[in-house]
Amino acid sequence: MHLPHEPTHLPVEVPDPSVPDEDTLVPLKIEDWLTVIIMGLLALITFANVLVRYFSDQSFAWTEEFSVFLMIALALVAGSASVARNRQIRIEFFADSGSAARQRALARFGAIMVFLLFALIAVLSSRMVYDDIRYGETSPGIGVPQWWYTIWLPVMSVAIAGRALGLFIRRGRQS
């Protein structure tokens, strides 16, 4: 039973898997395989930790720290894939309405803004990595050098910026 103010059906657009991805200079399979690898590692680490806790009432100390790192890496990899496939968050009412030229212009504007944001994040996070190395920061859980974790933010930010620039160029070539 639905209340009068509750929607009975929310429109959700699910991407059609039969539609091929656009051609990109760097293959999209990179993000796809990184996602599979990271998800597999997360599942294995979590399962191993559950087994150890169940049989010994202790846990691996490193699993939480490494799992958080993997989840952040997964979010960045997924962000790169969503930008490359033009499936990043946007207000579809504005982005998908109007003429084809307007849609293309808005797609290019969004892509260049994503590029600028992640280029800035790459520059600023590089400074953070430099500070981690310079001051010898170690991770709080297991004491490994902190830059082992933080180096991936500027690397993945450059990847996302590159994907956004590629999308900007591809949308400019459309007629």
Image (spheres, grey):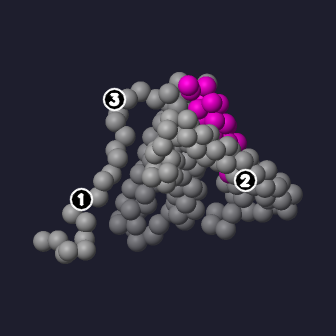
Measuring from the top left, give residue 79's x and y in whole percent: 55, 47
For the record, the magenta segment spans 152-175
Asked if residue 65 lies in the magenta stretch, the reply is no
Residue depicted at x 41% and y 27%: 20
Which residue sits at x=41%, y=51%?
43
Mark 2 burial class by Cα count in 10 Å: few <14, some 14-19, many 20+:
some
Query: Residue at the location (63% across, 30% down)?
Result: 172
What residue is pinned by disc 2? 121
The answer to whether any part of residue 163 appears in the image is no
Of circles 1 and 2, the one toward us is 1
Q: Residues within 10 Å of mark 1 (few under 14, many from 20)?
A: few
Pointers 2 and 3 in contact (C-beta within 8 Å):
no
| Of callouts 3 and 1, the N-terminal one | 1
- Give the residue furthest to the front: 99
Left or right, 56 with respect to 168, comes to left
In percent of width and height, residue 163 lies at 62, 37
Give amino acid for label 1: His
Classify the position of the C terminus by image quarter. top right
Q: Nearer the viewer, residue 26 or 36?
A: 26
Residue 110 x %, y %: 61, 46
Q: CA distance from mark 2 to mark 3?
A: 34 Å
N-terminal-most mark, 1 or 2: 1
Callout 2, which amino acid?
Answer: Ile
Of the pair 21 and 122, the residue shown nearer to us: 21
* Position in image of residue 78 (x %, y %): 52, 46
Separation of marks 3 and 1 at Cα, in angstroms: 25 Å
Q: Which residue is mark 1?
A: 9
Magenta segment: does it hold 170? Answer: yes
